[in-house]
Amino acid sequence: MKSTVKSFSVEYFQVLDSEGNVDNSLMPNIPESKIKEIYHLMVLVRTFDEKLFKLQRSGKIGTYAEVRGEEASEVGSAMALEKEDWMCPSFRETGVFITRGAPRDKIVQAWRGDVRAFKGDKKNLPVAIPVGSQTLYATGIAWASKLKNEKDITIVYFGDGATSEGDFYEAMNFAGEFKLPIIFFCQNNQWAISTPRKSQSASETIAQKGIASGVYSVQVDGNDAVGVYKITKEAVDRARNGEGPTLIESITYRMGDHTTSDDSSRYRTEEEVKYWLARDPLLRLEKYFRNINTWNDEYGRWVKETCEKEVDEAIAKALAIEKPGPDELFDYVYAVMPKELQEQKKELEEEVKQRGL
Amino acid sequence: MAKINMVQAINQALKQEMEKDKRVLVMGEDVGVDGGVFRVTDGLIQQFGKDRVIDTPLAEAGIIGTALGMAINGLKPVVEMQFIGFSYEGFHHINHHMARFRQRSEGTVNASIVLRGPTGGGIKALELHSESPETFFAHCQGLKVVIPSNPYDAKGLMISSIRDPDPVVFLEPEKLYRAFKDEVPEESYTVPLGEAKVARQGKDITIVTWGAMVRLCLDVAEQLKGKIDVEVIDLRTIWPLDENAILESVKKTGRAVVVHEAPKTSGFGGEVAARIQEKAILYLNSPIVRVTGFDVPYPQFALEEYYMPNAERIIKGINSVMNF
């Protein structure tokens, strides 16, 4: 005997196409003013990128991971969350932090390697460097919300490369098994440093990796801010209503290098970059506004100038923050400092004093 | 006072802390319906239900990682590793996240977790069921590392570990689980973390040891009674280290042997020896000797007897120090 015991499909959503045309059957209930707000935030994120890139080149911040190209994916998804929801980033979610209202100067401070920036922020977790590992503690956060009967949901961000990690599969499995209020938001930006999406996995979609674990999984055009907002909002509502986890594969493109330490011309073609430049998420929203006659160039200039001013102020403020002192090295390792650390702290303090640092 | 073994003592500690604090929960492979493969969590699911005694999927990284998330969101998970050697499957969550979250978040997050599991050899178990990884954990700055040597300490140290705001790795010598019983008070009590115990007083030589080796060293001390007066220090907490207890003893005896099951090179005995020479070298009458496992992977059990430090080796070590 032979029979098909299970089959599945993966749905793909796009509300605004690359020319800014709307699929009215999918258009969510979203006021025009909110789309303008999304656009404004996306310009702010782009401006942040431009200025922080230069700041890195002048040695004033450390390594920086540009968001460029992924603004719709980040801002659109973050707009669908409530302030009380938990957000677990990887390292490229500057746009999510901005949308979630993180003080702009603090974001710059964090990119200067200064963790004081987010002290006290319980709901937006610190950047996670070990790729994909954040999916597991995010799952635990969502699990605790469920066990405590709290209504907060959790979103966790990661890239296409992270879906090759074992942690990702374990997180899917736990979230599916315990029906947890979590959204796995995969920014499939086509590249994990120099490894293209197609060399990362033979799985035809990333979305289907969630299906095996009982996680509702979809694809969305990640350069369509309205589509990303719609799909994330639906996942948020489902999670909050106790209907379990969602994996969203947001198909986008890393227009910049991996980080300021990378040179992507070594491994990808100009043609490919050009193809995606034409699909720039900011241009798409501008086309949409033009199509519905709510765009004028003066508005565009005003948004850009406002954002530049905001970022300039944030940078000036961040650069004026005094360097962390030696206390910071020891004070937060344990709730009560062990004797060894007390002694070592004293040693360092004496050294700092002698060297006049 | 009832006499109970280490399994029962830890079970009592878990039960009493779960009764006291609703945030405390137990999770791991087979900890619920089955009560854990060593029965440490026996009976807890009947009393506290499946939301507080959670049978998890078989995935160590998943268990440790999600437990950390629960702690970030205000719960206090006590996580069982079926055998501590299996924690290597989730080691990155211990080192990258559990140990570092407090510092990374500038004290915003306390990763208040107890990661507990059977450690050490001597029960003819399968490969990777007999590991002594205390040094790995002691080197993950931000963790505390605890290892009891008897039922009384096991209960009191477990209660302290659960109440501690920092992440604690709690190593339970599997050889001792049912090896002997102690008088253990029924009521709740704590044994403070970071405090060693003088398990036996003596004036000729100090043995610094921990876990299952404590009993063996006490036996050796008895054997040598009348010839060499041996003092035995049971560290109980590997990290933070109770340096004073070690120094005080060595300053009195002028001689030291360190005994542990883990391999010699880079084992925690090296750290103990270094502390003694840094801070008490002029009190020493002879070099410090380490009696430890060999620098080989813990063997499959046909070879176990060769690997494990035994009374003869400890006596040889003591004699070489005494006769220097």
Image (cartoon, coloured by chain):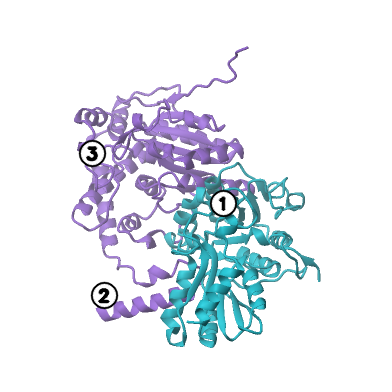
Q: Quadrant of the N terminus of chain B?
A: bottom right
Could you say where residue B61 lies in the image, as x and y percent from the top left? 52, 47
Residue located beneath label 2 in the image: A357
B48 or B87, which is in the foreground? B87
Instruction: Report in which chain the residue with disc 2 lies.
Output: A
As drawn, the chain in cyan is B
- Cα–Cα gap, marks 2 and 1: 41 Å
Q: Which residue is mark 1?
A: B67
Neighbours of disc 1 within 10 Å: few (<14), some (14-19), many (20+): many
Q: Secondary structure at mark 2?
A: loop
Q: Same chain for labels 3 and 2? Say yes or no.
A: yes
Figure quadrant of residue B10: bottom right
Task: Say which residue appears at 25% left-offset and 41% top-offset.
Answer: A257
Instruction: Determine the secondary structure under disc 3.
Output: helix
Please rate how many residues cluster around mark 3, counting C-alpha atoms within 10 Å: few if below 14, some from 14 to 19, many from 20: some
Q: CA distance from mark 3 to mark 2?
A: 39 Å
- Mark 1, chain letter? B
Return the mark for residue A264.
3
